[in-house]
Amino acid sequence: KFGAFLDFMYSKEDIDRKRIITGMLGGGASLPGAEYMSVVTKLNYRFTPNWNVFVKGMYETASLGKSNKVLGETFADGKYRTSLGYFAGLEYYPIENSNLHFFLTYVGRKFDYTSKVALKDYDTNRVSVGFIYQMKMF
């Protein structure tokens, strides 16, 4: 009836493969020393055989582990962005032993930038209604 998970991810990159920090700072050459940290957790509760409710939260940071000088411009070490994600949803499974389910979800995101970046903080919100059905092909 109840399920949960917690994921922790940390990435220290010699070259900014994800290009998140590089994109924040102009999108030119990939910056060395990018560091990304992410924590994701999700809780599910199947309160009847046909109904499931869930909440999910995310915390992510994007930082430079060391100061860089690229193409004559200096970039200070430290955190550049913190983002939060929060989800809540309700799912209905009308057929036993089938993956068909209908859902209603809310998704919110918040992006906070430090003074190292000339970007403005912002939030996004979305409500989704739909269904999912995975067909067995093989």
Image (spheres, rainbow, N blue to C red):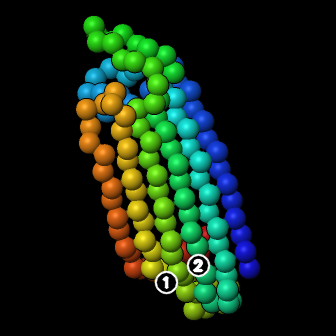
- Location of residue 72 by image quarter: top left
Q: Total label count?
A: 2
Q: Residues within 10 Å of mark 1 (few under 14, many from 20)?
A: some
| Label 1 element class | strand
The quarter in which the C terminus is drawn is bottom right
- Nearer-N-terminus badge (2/1): 2
Q: Give the label, 2 or 1, closer to the camera.
A: 2
Q: Are marks 2 and 1 in contact (CB under 8 Å)?
A: no
* Residue 17 point in image, percent of width and height: 45, 30
Viewer-proximal residue, 87 or 118?
118
Image mark for residue 28: none
Residue 97 appears at what percent x and percent y? Answer: 68, 85
Along the viewing direction, whichever of 27 and 41 lies nearer the viewer: 41
Q: Residue at x 73, y 74 (%)?
A: 2
Q: Is residue 28 above or below residue 40?
A: above
**Residue 69, placed above or below residue 87:** above
Res. 102 mark: 1
Q: Is residue 122 above or below residue 92?
A: above
Local crowd at mark 2 within 10 Å, few (<14), some, or many (≥20)? some
In the picture provided, is 123 more to the left or to the right than 83? Answer: left
Residue 54 in picture, x, y percent from top left: 58, 73
Q: Give the quarter of the figure containing the N terminus.
A: bottom right
Extreme residue in the top direction = 72
Point 57% across, 32% down: residue? 11
Q: Determine the CA span between mark 2 and mark 1.
A: 12 Å
> Which residue does the numbered mark 2 point to in the structure image?
53
For the point 35% across and 68% down, which residue is it? 126
* Residue type, mark 1 in image: Phe
Who's the residue at 56% across and 44% down the image?
38
